[in-house]
Image (cartoon, rainbow, N blue to C red):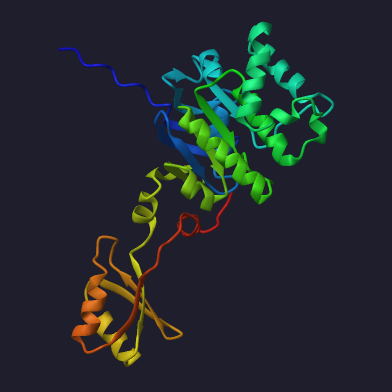
Amino acid sequence: MSSETPPPPAVETAGLSRNYGDTLALKHLDLTVNQGDLFGFIGSNGAGKTTTLRILATFLAPSGGTAKVLGHDVVRDADAVRHIIGYMPDFFGVYKDMEVTEYLDFFGACYKIPSAKREQTVTDVLELVGLSEKRGALIGALSRGMQQRLGLARVLIHDPRVLLLDEPASGLDPRARIEVMAILQELQRMGKTIIISSHILSELQTLCNRVAIIEKGQLIYSGPVQGVRDQLATGRVMWVRVSTDIDQAVSLLKSHPQITGVENLDGRLKVTLADHESDHAIVADVLVRGGGRLVELREDELGLEEVFLRVTKGETQ
């Protein structure tokens, strides 16, 4: 009985390192991105996000370790990698005096797409990114958001399986940002694997199914979005209000071994439980048994952004 070989990860790095002189920009990065993921790559400026993406895109050689895209080594099989990725840097040049279709046709020719097929390919990618009505426009006349969408169209021209997008929504107004994120969701539905680095953490929280947090070149977390808080947040936090004596409530709560902190903040109690597995019913039980009257009991839902800020402490290189 033969078993099928599982498909390789979309991206896999092992001990990936990169030095810039005496500065270690990446420190033994072990990262796995599965095929079909919409993967958020989160980090402060200088954390190592762009360095990682440039290595995966074969533009930068690693100083140590390995990186593979769909099983192809980015150093030994660089040509194979380039045919299966689409890389969009945070700042990319556009030829402002070219028309939109001329620009995309040029890149289609670079990827050796036959001229008979290029026109339809250009039409298809323009429709996908919502720029069909701008096909004859000069690039210089496009808004920033439209230029970003054109950049996406360019990396899609050869139908890559893996997209590496470095800050694709940087500098966009809220509407343009939402439009770009909607395009990325559609691309994931089409079966593309997408790695997106960004500081727009609140949007990655809802956009991505998995995320990685990197700080000073080291991986802090990698896994499902919903697992970030459980692994990185320090204890479960509850907000409590009582209608009885607040000092008595503080004393009662502090006496329980699974409650590690109680703060009185203008009449509301911030109660920290030992870990995320602790049952918040402990708080109600302690107060009611001690004669307290509970008015409010609410869990503090840490967002991805707040967890990130706590973990990284705002530090950058």
Q: Is residue 18 above or below residue 198?
A: above
Q: Tell me residue 177's x, y (percent).
A: 63, 45
Q: Residue furthest bottom?
A: 245
Q: Is residue 74 above or below residue 146?
A: above
Q: Residue furthest right?
A: 97
Q: Residue furthest front?
A: 133
Q: Tell me residue 45's x, y (percent).
A: 60, 47
Residue 23 appears in the figure: no
In which quarter of the view is residue 284 placed? Answer: bottom left
Q: Is residue 112 left or right of residue 161?
A: right
Q: Is residue 303 above or below residue 87?
A: below
What residue lies at 34% left-to-right and 55% top-to-bottom?
A: 230
What residue lies at 70% left-to-right and 40% top-to-bottom?
A: 145
Number of numbered discs present?
0
Q: Tell me residue 34's x, y (percent).
A: 39, 31
Residue 158 appears in the figure: yes
What residue lies at 28% left-to-right and 67% top-to-bottom?
A: 274
Residue situated in front as seen by the camera: 43 or 167: 167
Residue situated in front as seen by the camera: 151 or 57: 151
What residue lies at 45% left-to-right and 18% top-to-bottom?
A: 72
In which quarter of the view is residue 131 placed? Answer: top right
Residue situated in front as seen by the camera: 134 or 236: 134
Q: Tell me residue 31's x, y (percent).
A: 41, 35
Q: Is residue 100 left or right of residue 236?
A: right
Q: Is residue 56 above or below residue 223?
A: above
